[in-house]
Image (spheres, rainbow, N blue to C red):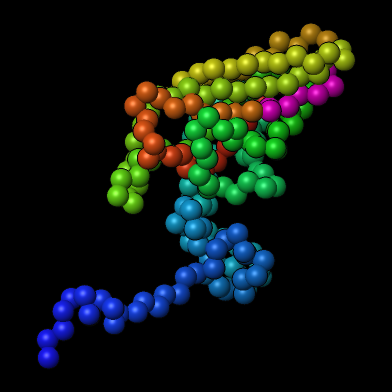
Amino acid sequence: MIMSNQALSELIQRFAISALSRERKAEALNEEILVGKYSGEFYIKTKEGIVLSADIMNRAKAATNEAVRIAELVGMTGDIYHVDFENIVLPGFVDYDDNILQQEPINIPVDAKELLIHLDLDEYNILNGDPQLIHSDGNVKILIEIVEDGITRYVRVDKDLSSINFNKIPLELKGKVSSIKIMNITIGKAANIGANNTILLHNLFVTINH
């Protein structure tokens, strides 16, 4: 008896086991493999219970070296910070025109004079389920809140994505400053960006001149 393709397909049953998501790392056993369900990067939970990823560590090291190089190039010789979030897992996808920081503003020391923000990201065009790396020239908008002499004012930055990492942000402080916060970082769509494009944010750095 020869079975039709349709009959064969009805007999086929798939059974697959997926690695545990990194977001559920608390439930992982020591020496268990985990995976970033959105980024595709693999992790391992060590014998000591520490979750590590060689891919992410190597990317972070390279990104740190690049952030330091650019900061020195533009005259930012102060402190450089790798920003970690409580509720945002990096690397992770972010939407165009949405605040990357969500509900987690970045607190800046009140004696800061200049800032430099460094975005380590990739842009992809998703075609038939496959990501293709692209480079767009969308704009980056940054909103910084400053409370000075009891009065709240804002510094607004609007730069091209290709140049934002090279642009120092002067804060022009004159009075007694009680608070400086980066409230909003938004990446806008360039004209050539379609509905299938997305951003994968790997690392975020802030360099501060005092």
Q: Residue at x 52, y 24 (%)?
A: 140
Q: Is residue 145 visible?
A: yes
Residue 186: image location, x then y, percent: 56, 28
Above or below, comparing residue 41 to residue 111 in the picture = below
**Who is closer to the viewer here, 189 or 161?**
189
Q: Where's residue 85, x and y in %? A: 67, 44
Nearest to the observer: residue 146 or residue 197: 197
Where 136 falls versus 91 (above or below)? above
- Residue 4 as seen in the image, left or right of residue 45: left
Task: Give how far across and how far down residue 202 sits, in percent.
Answer: 51, 43
* Percent x, y of residue 185: 59, 29
To which quarter of the image does residue 71 belong? top right
Asked whether residue 62 is in view, the answer is no
> In the picture shown, does residue 29 fall above or below 100?
below
Side of 51 relative to 153 (left or right):
left
Q: How many marks?
A: 0
* Residue placed most toward the observer, 8 or 64: 8
* Residue at 83% over, 13% down: 151
Name the dominant secondary structure of the magenta segment: strand
Residue at (30% x, 49% y) in the render: 128
* Magenta stretch encompasses residue 21: no
User: Which residue extends farthest top?
Assistant: 174
- Which residues make up the magenta segment? 176-183
Q: In which quadrant of the rendered view does residue 132 lie?
A: top left
Quadrant housing the C terminus: top right
**Quadrant containing the N terminus in the rendered view:** bottom left
Determine the residue positioned at 60% across, 32% down. Answer: 99
